[in-house]
Amino acid sequence: MCFTTTVAIAALRIAGKAELDSPRTTLTMRGDQVAVESLQLPRYEEDVGALNVARVLYSLLSIPLFMRLIQFLRYFKSVGVLSIVLAEMVKDVILFAIILAVTVSSFAVAFGTLLNDVDSQDEWYKKPLGLDPVWAPVWAVFGGLSKVGIAQYAKDMPQIIQRVAPFLLWTFAFVILILIRLLVAMLATTYGRIIKESEGFWLFERAQLISEYKDTKPPLPPPFNILWYLFYSLPRLIKSRARTDKSSLQRGFKRVPDTKMLKVYLKREQHAHQKCILMQQTRRAGTMVARSERHENSIKSLEEKNRARFEALNRRIDLIMAASDS
C-alpha cells in the first residue's frame, strides 16, 4: 500500500512535477494513502479468506499425494495383490454406503424432530462436531454415540419424549450393529473371491507399470523433468526433423496395453474360456448320446438274436414232441 504511493510519487517526479514537495501535495498524498489503505482493507480480508481456502485445498490434496505412493509399491507382489483386493472392496463399500446413508438420515431426522431444542441459537448444520441430535447418528456409526449425552440433552423434555428417546436410541444401535456385520461379511466374501484371481491381475499391472516408466515417463519428477526434455527430447526432435529415413529401431514394450485394454482382454479371455467349456460339455454330451445309442442298438440286436434262438428251440421241441407221440 505504501509502496504504491511511493511509486506514484517517484513517477510524478520523473515526469517533472516539481510541486510534489509542497505541503499541499504532501497532504494530498497522505490523504490518497489513507484512501488506498481504506479501500484495500476489504481486499486484505478477502486474501485471508483465500489463504484459508488454499490451506483447505492443500490439506485435502496432501492425502492423494501420499496415496500416489501405492502405485509404486504395487511393484511388490504382497502390496500389489492387496491393492487389487482393496479396489474390488470399494465397490461393496459404495453399495453399502447407499443403505447406510438412507438409514442414518432417517434416524437423524427422527432424533432431530424428537429432541429439537427450540431455544438454541445455532442451527444444526453449524455444529456438526458438537452434541446435536441430528449429527448424533452420524458419529454413532464410528462409535461416538453416548447415551449419557442424549439423556442429558433430553432431561428437560416432556415425559413421553424421555421414554421414546431411549427406545429409539436402542433401535438405531441395533440396526447399525447389523449393518456393520453385513459389511464385514460382504468384504470377507469379496476377499476370498478376489484373492484367488488377483495374482494374474497383479502380473498385468506390474508389466504396465514397468512399461509406463520405461517408455512414456521421464526419469526426473516435475518440475525437474524440463531438464530431461531439454537434454533428451530436443536433440531427438532435431534429428527426426533432419533425417529423411524413417526406418529405425523403437524402444521395447510398445505393445503392452493399458488398464482398459487389459480389462477388455480379460473379458474376452473369460468369454472364450466359458465358450470352450460349453463346447467340451456339448461334445461330451454328444459322445455320451452316441455311446448310449450304440448300446441300445446292440441290446436290440441281442434281443432279436435271443428271440430267434428261442423260437428255433421251440420248433425243435415241438418236432421232438410230435415224433415221440407218433
Image (tube, helix red, strand yellow):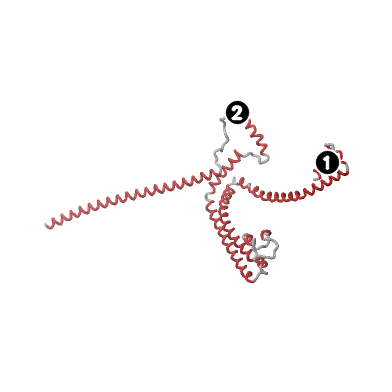
Q: Is residue 212 above or below residue 126?
A: above
Does residue 47 appear left or right of residue 171 in this picture? right
Q: Residue at x 83, y 47 (%)?
A: 31
Q: Is residue 102 above or below residue 275?
A: below
Residue 239 location (% of width, % of height): 62, 30
Q: Which mark is residue 243?
A: 2
Q: Residue at x 70, y 50 (%)?
A: 53
> For residue 109, which quarter of the picture?
bottom right
* Sequence-wise first label, 2 or 1: 1
Q: Which mark is residue 9?
A: 1
Q: Amino acid at mark 2?
A: Arg
Residue 1 location (% of width, % of height): 79, 45
Q: Secondary structure at mark 2?
A: loop
Q: Which mark is residue 171?
A: none
Instruction: State the separation of the CA atoms marked 2 and 1.
Output: 60 Å
Residue 163 location (% of width, % of height): 62, 70
